[in-house]
Image (spheres, rainbow, N blue to C red):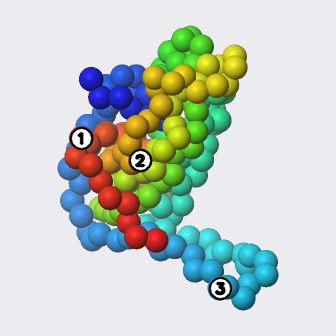
Amino acid sequence: MRKFSWPLLVAAPLVSMLAVSGCMSEGTASPSRPSSSPKQTSPSPQPSPTTPHDIIFQTYKEYWKLLPEAGRSSPERARAMLKSFVEGAYLDHLVKGIREMRSQGREPYGDVVPQVKEIWVSKGFAKVLDCQGISGTGMADARTHQLIPETARTKPTDNIEVEMKLASDGRWRVTGLSAKEKPCTPPSP
C-alpha cells in the first residue's frame, strides 16, 4: 500500500482519494511568481491577484498553509477554518480524516510546500497540478509532537491533482484531490 504524507492522510484516510473529473482547458498557465530585486531593503506590497490563475494559485497556497493548523484542531474548529477554502463532500471528507487522525492520537508533522506546475481553468472549474514538496512531513504523536518514524516521507515530492470550483460567493474552493503514482519534477524557480 502507498504511504501518503500527512495532508493526504488527513485529506483521504488511507487511499480513498477523490478522483479528478476531466476539466476542459481554456489554457495552461504557470503561476506568476513575484520578482524580488536584490536592492530592495524591505518588501514592497504585492498587488492583489487579478487573473483567475493568480487567484486560484494564491487560494491554493493559503489552503496548504492553513491545513496543518486545521489538522491539529478539533474537527469542529477545523471545519470552520477550512470552509473558506474547501467545500462540499470534500470538506466533510477532510473533517472525517481529521477526526480519525485525532482519535488515533496523531497530528500533522512538517509542512507541505506547494510547487504548482499548471493550472487549467474552464467555466468556473479549475484543476491544479502540483509537484508538492513533502520532505520532512509525516505524522506526529499529538501528546509529544514528535515524528512517528514509520510515517516519515521517504521521497521529496508528491504528484497531485486538485479540483477547484468557483463558489457562489466568488471564492475558489478545493472540491477534490487525488494522488498520482507517477513521479513528478517541480517547476524551475
Image point (31%, 40%), residue name: 179
Task: Quickly name the residue at label 2.
Answer: 156
* Classed neighbour count for the residue bearing mark 3: other residues with Cα under 10 Å, few (<14), some (14–19), many (≥20): few
User: Which label sits on residue 153?
Assistant: none
- Residue 30 appears in the rendering: yes
SS category of the residue bearing label 2 = loop
Label 1: which residue? 181
Q: Which residue occupies 29% across, 54% down? A: 184
- The quadrant the N terminus occupies is top left
Residues under numbered marks 2 and 3 in contact, where contact means CB atoms less than 8 Å apart: no
Q: Horizontal and vertical percent for residue 98?
A: 53, 23
Q: Does residue 1 sit above or below 35 in this rendering?
A: above
First in sequence: mark 2 vs mark 1: 2
Q: Residue furthest bottom?
A: 39
Residue 90 lies, in percent from the top left, at 41, 33
- The extreme right residue here reads 41
Q: How many marks?
A: 3
Q: Residue at x 37, y 53 (%)?
A: 131
What residue sits right under mark 3 in the picture? Answer: 37
Pick the front one: 37 or 166: 37
Q: The residue tagged with tag 1: helix, strand or loop?
A: loop
